[in-house]
Every structure is written in C-alpha cells, then in structure tokens.
Image (cartoon, coloured by chain):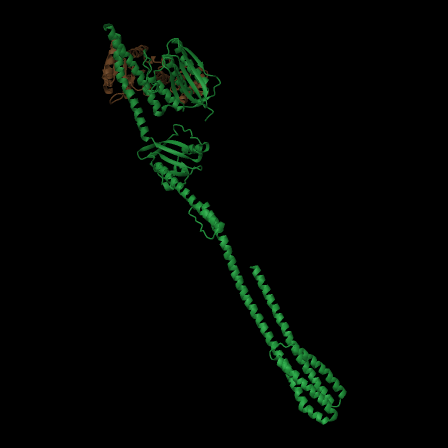
Amino acid sequence: MGAPRILIVDDERNIRLTLKAVLDAIGLEADAVFQGEEALQKLAEKTYAVMILDLRLPGMDGLTVLRRAAERLSETKVIIITAYGTVEAVVEAMKLGAVDFLQKPFEPTEVREIVGRVLAISEGGPTAFTYENYLDLAGKSIAEKKFSAAFVYAHKAIFIDQHRPEAFNILGGLYEIRDQRKEAVTHYQVARKIDGAYAPAQQNLERATGKPYSKVGIVWG
Amino acid sequence: MVIVALILVLAIALLLRLGRASDAILQENYLSTLAAENMINDIERQDSGVLLILLDFKELGIKELHESEVGFLQWLGRAKDNITVPGEREVVEAIEKHYTAYLQDVSQLRLTREMDRDHAVALYHDQILPRFRTIRDTCIQLRTLNHEAMYTASRQARHLAGQAVLFISLIGGAAILVGMTFSLLLSRLISRPVTELKNAVSHLAEGDYSVHVPVHGGGELRLLAEAFNDMAEKLKHFHNMNIDQMLAEKRKSEAIIRSVDDGLVVVDEKLLITNLNPKATAIFQVDPEDALGKHVLEVVRDESIFQGLKAALESGQPPHLTDEENVLPVPKDDGDQLFQVAILPMRSRAGVIPGAVLVLRDITRMKELERLKSEFVMTASHELRTPLTSIGMSVGMLMESAAAKLTDQERELLGVCHEEVNRLKTLVNDLLDLSKIEAGRLEISLEPVTPAFLSLQASTMIKPQAEAGGIALTVEVPEDLPEVLADPNKIVWVLVNLLANAVRYTPSGGHVRLLGERVGDAVHMKVQDDGPGVPREMQSRIFDKFVRLDQGEASGGSGLGLAISKEIIRAHRGGIWLESEPGRGSTFTFTLPLAGRV
C-alpha cells in the first residue's frame, strides 16, 4: 500500500483547499468532500487512514457522520474540526471515536503535527490510542496553556479508562481554570476516591476547598 | 341671690312685727272695751246701791254707791284718755254727761229718801232708772264700738299683713327672678367672650383657621378679642400660603411620580404601601386603590425585594443586592419582563424618613439588546474563525514555501499578514471571553482574603516574565492589611493583567512595583511602573475595549485586558483608574471593599 490517504470533509472550499495544500506539502494524498453523505460514500469506496471532519456541515452533521461510520473507525482515524470556542461538542465526538481535533483557527504546523501524530500512533495498531497517550497529550497542552485541548484529551483519557485518578485530577484542574470550582472539587474527589494515595488530587482538593481560595498552585500530576 | 332671699325673709319678719304693732294699737281699743265693761259693771253696782238705799239698807247702799262711783269715774277717765275710734269721743262725752246727771239724780234721791220714800221711789222710777239704762246702754255702745273697731282693725291688719306677705312674696319672687336673670345675664356678659375665646383657641389648635371671635363690649375683653382675631387672620394667611405651597409641591411630586417611566412603590416603616405610581400598578397588575395600605408582600410577591426593603428600613442604607436579586422577572404573555430593582431608604435634609422606595426600571429591552449583542459577538467570533483559518493557513504556507522567491519587502509584507492574522486570532478569542463576561457569566464568589495573599499569588505568576525582561519587580503590600471581600481568582487575574502590562511596556532595567494601602473602608491596590507612561489623549479611553497603546513593538495584547479588569473590579463594587504622566511612568489603582464592612 502507498502513502496513507486522507479524507477531508468540510463545507468551506477554502478550508478544503488550504488543508489539502498543507497535506500535499508533506506528501500526503487527500480527497476533499463537502458533505456528510459524500464522506460516507467515499469511506465506502476507499480506505482512508485519516478523516478530517468538520463538525458543522450542511445536512448531515459531523456527529452523525461519526455515528454512521462507526464500524470503519478502526481503520480510519477521525480528526475533528471545530469552529466553536467551546469544546463540549468535541468531547462528544471523541467519545464517538474521534481520536484528535483541530480547533479553528489552526495553522499549517498544527495540522501537520496532529495528522503526523495520528498516523504515527496508527502504526501501532487499533489499540495504540491509549490512556497514557491522551494523558501525555493533556499534559503537553497544559504546558502550552492550551487548556481547551487539554480538556478534550483528559476527557478522552477518562473515556478510555475510568479507573485511574490522573485524568480526573487533570480535569479537575482544568475546571478550576474555567472557574468551575464545584466541578473541579468533584473531579478531585473522584480521583482521590479511585486512589487514596494519589497525592496531587489530595493537594488540589485541600487547596480548592480551602480559604482563601486560589487556583494558583494546581498540581497537574 | 341668697342675699336677696335673706332680705326678703327679713322684710317678711318686719312686716309680721308691724302686724304685732297694730295689735298694740288694738290694745287701746281693748282698754276702752275694758273701761266700758267696768263702767257697765260699776253703773250696775251703783244702781244696786241706789236700790239698796231705797230698800233701806242705807249704809250698804252708800258704800256700794261710793265704791262704784269711784270705779266708774276711774274707768271713765281711762276711757276719756283712750279715745281711738271715730265717734267714741261723742259716746264717752254722752256717758259723762248722763253720768253727771245720774249722780245729781242719785244725790237728790238720797235726800228725797230721807224725807219721802215714795217720792224717792218715783224719782228712781222716773229719772234714775231711765238714766241708768241710758248710761248702761251708752257704755255698751262704747264697748260695742270698740269691739267693732278692734275687730275691724284686727281684720284689716291681718288682711293687710296677708296682702303685704303676698305682695312681698310676689315682689321678692320677682326680685329673685329678676336678680337671677340679671346675674345670669351679667355673668354671661362677662364669661361669654371668654368662653368664645376659649372655643376659638381650641378650634385654632385643631387647625380650623377660619375661626373668628365676635367683638362686643369694651375694655380688655374687646382688646383681647380683637387681638385674637388679628392673630387668627394672620395664621390663616400663613397657613393658606403654606397649604397652597404644599399642595402645589404635592401635586408636582405626584405628577413626577406619575410621569416617571419606572415603577415606584413607596412603603412606610411597617412595609405597608403608601404610594405607587401607574407604572408600578401595571407591573404588579393591581388596582391602585386596592394596593394602598397593603403589605408590600401582598403586592410585590418577591422574597428578596421584601428582605431588601426590610434591610433598607433597618439600616437606612440601600441594601446590597446580588446581580440575581437585582433583576425582577415578571411573567408576561410574550416572555418575562425584566426589571432592575433599586431600593432606597427615604431621606430628607432633616434626616431619615421612616420608609423606603422601591424603583423598578424596565430593562427587558436593554437585556434583550445585551443578549443580542453578546450573541452577535459570539456568532461573529465563531464565524470569523473559518476565514481566519483559511488566511492563516495560506499565509503560513506561503511563508514556508514561497518566502525564498520573494524580495525582502515582499517577505516583510507577508510577515505583516502573519502578524495580523495572529492578532486577529487573539482578538477573536478575547471577544468570546468578553461576550461571556458581558452575558453575565462572570461569576464572582466573594470571600475575605488578605491583599498580601492576592499580591503574592499575582507576583509569583508574573515573576518569570519580569525576570526575562530584565525588570525589577517589588511587592510592597503590608502583611497586616485587613482582609478585603473579593474573588481571589478574579483579582489575581486583574493584578496579573496589570503587572503583565507594566512589564510589557517598561523597558529593560525598569522597575515595577505592586503596592497596597488602606484608605477608609477600602484597600487600594496599585501597580506602578517607571515606563514611558500613557499619552494624555489615551488616558480617558484606556479602559475601553480594543484600546491599545501604539508603542513600537507589537504587544500581542488584544486591548481587552483592561476592559475585562474594569468589569471585574466593577463586579466587586470597586473602582479602577489610571494616573500617568508621559515619560514618568503609570500607576493603575483599583479599590476593594474591606471584608469587615458588609
């Protein structure tokens, strides 16, 4: 098999065009469609390593496309494009099987990085997208102050394994950043419940419930 | 009156005594009667004496004669001395005359007896007996005369006395009546003006300024009445003037209250409604007449407003209402109508009037506009992302692949594009933040916190940036500053934002200071730098959205940091301002209320 093929699904012509140009530049062949139905048709015709899918589409929306393509997701990894400032829809898409996402406005380097990463992980087989992977991504995003990205990755990690405290702890910290203190405390509590010996959650809980309250000093783990 | 009655009694007593005096006069009649009686007796004894002489009892007869003669003359003398009745004199004189003749006859008889008994008897029979009878009858006449006189006099006296008593009683009664009437009239005459004055004063005291006291008589009472009328007149004048003024003022304020487009509800200290304007009746859909005097909760069914009014009445201060309490939603057919609530304790220059005013401003449209604006900003920020992405991607690609083929100037132009795209991206993100804040999603959770704590948090975060820029950062916030009521995260955000700005605009080697001091009921936090300062023309707009200092190097800020800071400080009920002199640095100051003062 030749180079991995990419399917771009976006109703905006210029986005399709620029995405294609960026991928071309790194030697990836891409097909671009502008509708959900068309995307499903393409998926049926060919094998794509990656589908870059805009959540907002005319007619069938991105989430519906995801649901319809559920059985193909082991071979085609989905990267979501979202134009919204909020990431709740992305979290939903990740739960439906998307592995990563691009938030508008994005840059060529971001596209290349994420696509490259997804392709690299895919090499490892269908189960290569692990809890640790996402935890790692979340940590990196936090370091770059990309809190909404971290938020999505932490959610994805929890979706993969709900019995580990780290992702809950990180999510708690992210809720604090978003000024949702109650949610934060809840997540710290869950993390501590899962593992009483997990120190970061304990520390965060003490700080978040203390007075005066300050979110300076979140322990990410 | 008592005196009059006393006089009357005295008069009656005197009259009775007068009656008794008339009895004394009668006494004399009685004397005459007695004299007549005795004379009759004596003349009869004399006659008996004569008869005894005739019967030869000479001794006894003479003795009898002498005794009775002496008695008779004695009584006759008395009768003569006591002539009281008209005609009595004649009768007494007749008695005297007849008796003198009788005595002569008796003397003759005594002489005759000695010589001729028969002749004597005949003499007795012919002369003495008739004379005797005449005397006796005359005496009886005297007696009768005096009897009658006595009777008449007594009857007349009694009659007169009776009449007198009657008259006196009548006159006395009349006098009493007249006296009483007079005294009553007299007392009335004196006391009436005083009573009238008294009544007039009470009327005046009750606020009836139209009272007028009739002026009569003279002297002090007249002067008093006139002075009083004068005073009442003046009072009335002043009162009317005041009333007119007050009425005018009242009408004016009522007109104002009515015409105000906000709903106004006035309550007294018991939270009973004393006034409400048409707008308020429309809001609560009540009848204005019905609502007056009712408890405010019966009309305004809102617990937080009730609590707010209660607090305002108790403290005399406008209550602190949270953003949520500040808005009263009233369900209407086409969705909720929103009213901004303001509660004001009533005050006058003289002090606090017990009561409070509830002001309801219709902010439905404003809120709707705000919502539309936020929605627009949010939509715009979403919609801008797609073209921004395309442009960014294109520029990025060009910079990677085509840069080598371009001239320096063209590369520079491409650089401008890249820079501006990045700026647009930040702007879009900040816009979204701002729209979230303005949509009321800026949640503030206040708690007591020391300014030192806040300063430490902020300086810790900014220290690496300052060190990297070669700027000295000093924190001079005393540890012992009292706690303020703040949302620590938001205030730390503001401090970081101000410090970051200061670090950003201060050249390397500069100095940024974070200061804190207590001023009255607040703590002032200051961020001071010795950078280039803010141009005067910018100072007034510095807290507006999208205002950035155009100073050489791109700052990377969106121009929203200060606008958001201002929103946050406002939500804390504080103030934020800038003092800056170009070339000599800037000082940003904001205030936070002390925690103890709630």
User: Taking B81 as reference, is A74 left or right?
Assistant: left
User: Taking A129 as reference, is B166 left or right?
Assistant: right
Count of marks overlaid on the render? 0
Residue at coordinates 64% horizontally, 86% vertically from top-left? B134
Residue at coordinates 67% horizontally, 84% vertically from top-left? B99
Would residue A167 be seen by someone viewing this image from the given angle?
no
Say above or below: A26 vs B60.
Answer: above
**What x and y, as percent, mark residue B351?**
45, 33
Say above or below: A212 vs B419.
Answer: below
Observer-nearest residue: A50 or B16? Answer: B16
**Quadrant in which residue A140 is drawn:** top left
Say above or below: B415 vs B291.
Answer: above
Chain B on-screen colour: green
Location of the C terminus of chain B by quadrant is: top left
**What x and y, as percent, mark residue A123?**
31, 10
Would residue B106 be seen by someone viewing this image from the given angle?
yes
Observer-nearest residue: B148 or A205? Answer: B148
**Quadrant in which residue B461 is drawn:** top left
Residue at coordinates 73% horizontally, 85% vertically from top-left? B65
**What x and y, as percent, mark residue B534?**
35, 15
Location of the N terminus of chain B by quadrant is: bottom right
Chain A on-screen colour: brown
**Quadrant in which residue B369 is drawn:** top left
User: Taking B35 as reference, is B476 left or right?
Assistant: left
User: Taking B69 as reference, is B430 left or right?
Assistant: left
Residue at coordinates 67% horizontally, 82% vertically from top-left? B40
**What x and y, as percent, mark residue A17?**
23, 14
